[in-house]
Image (cartoon, grey):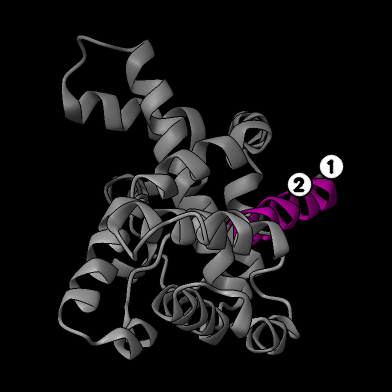
Amino acid sequence: MENLIIKLNQYPSLNISCVDCIVRWTVASSSTLDAGLEAKLKASEGLFSNHQIYQVLFFLIQRYQAVRKTKEIFLKFLFRKSFKYIKKQFDDQHKGMLKRQLAQKFIETYLPQVGQKGHKLTRCCSSFTKTKLIKKISNKFLKDLLSNDRFLMEFIKFLKIFKEYAEKESNKKIPKLVHQIQGLIDRNQLEDIKNIHHLPWLNLWLDRCKSMGEEITNKMN
């Protein structure tokens, strides 16, 4: 925290570069969700040379700490990313095939246990929450999905690069959040930072996803 304050105090004003610095620190920090962080920030308020900079950091920390992610949300995120990655790798290896043939081959290779529902599954694999087929990730769903040795093998390989892969995608959302906050600053509505939706995923959350994935594969093995 002390190093962050020193860095933020180097900014002459609360400009967009300063906001970007605050957001990137919050997303990457291992202390963002610490129970005592809010109190620590309040105690350090007088160390900030610009009170608005303190407010942006404080409200953004409050916003992230208000988020409640369930085990199911973590699993949906993890498997949505894994499907996207595995399907992309598969498609790249079978260029030239018609889309429907490609989908059928993917099902036969990785998802034979889902039967006729396979087409629906491949269409919806990138958005678990938008399909009744995968409305809830149950133990049965995980067992069925990972019972295919080839899919399990690819999923284990994906877990090794998941953090880097997901961080890269999450970081693409940071500029959007920075501009949202900058808009609130311009309208003098800093407290509305606490109401922002669609936040980039914290590195802490990505670590939790990976840990859960490893736990599941260990059980399967």
Percent x, y for residue 24? 49, 54
Dot 1 falls on a residue whose secondary structure is loop
Residue nearest the viewer, comparing 204 with 187: 187
Q: Which amino acid does label 1 sit on?
A: Asn
Q: Which residue is drawn at 38% across and 59% down?
A: 12
Please state which amino acid type lies under the numbered disc 2: Thr
**Percent from the top left, x then y, of residue 198?**
33, 69
70 left or right of 182 in image: right
From which residue to which does the magenta span run?
203-220
In front here: 95 or 24?
A: 24
Where is residue 219 shown, x and y percent of the image? Answer: 83, 52
Residue at image x 37%, y 27%?
Answer: 88
Q: Reply yes or no: does residue 214 show up in magenta.
A: yes
Residue at 59% x, 54% y is 28
Q: Quadrant of residue 36?
A: bottom right
Q: Does the magenta stretch include residue 218?
A: yes
Tag shown at residue 217: 2
Does 216 sit above or below residue 85?
below
Which corner quadrant of the image does residue 33 belong to? bottom right
Q: Quadrant of residue 104?
A: top left
- Structural crowding at the residue carrying mark 1, measured as other residues with C-alpha within 10 Å and reported as few (<14), some (14–19) or many (≥20): few
**Residue 32 pos. (x, y %):** 64, 70
- Provide the residue designation for mark 1: 221
Q: Is residue 215 above or below residue 129?
A: above
Does residue 65 appear left or right of residue 117 in this picture? right
| Residue 31 visible in the snapshot | yes
Q: Identify the element where label 2 is drawn.
A: helix
Q: Residue at x 29, y 56 (%)?
A: 16
Mark 1 touching mark 2, by CB under 8 A? yes
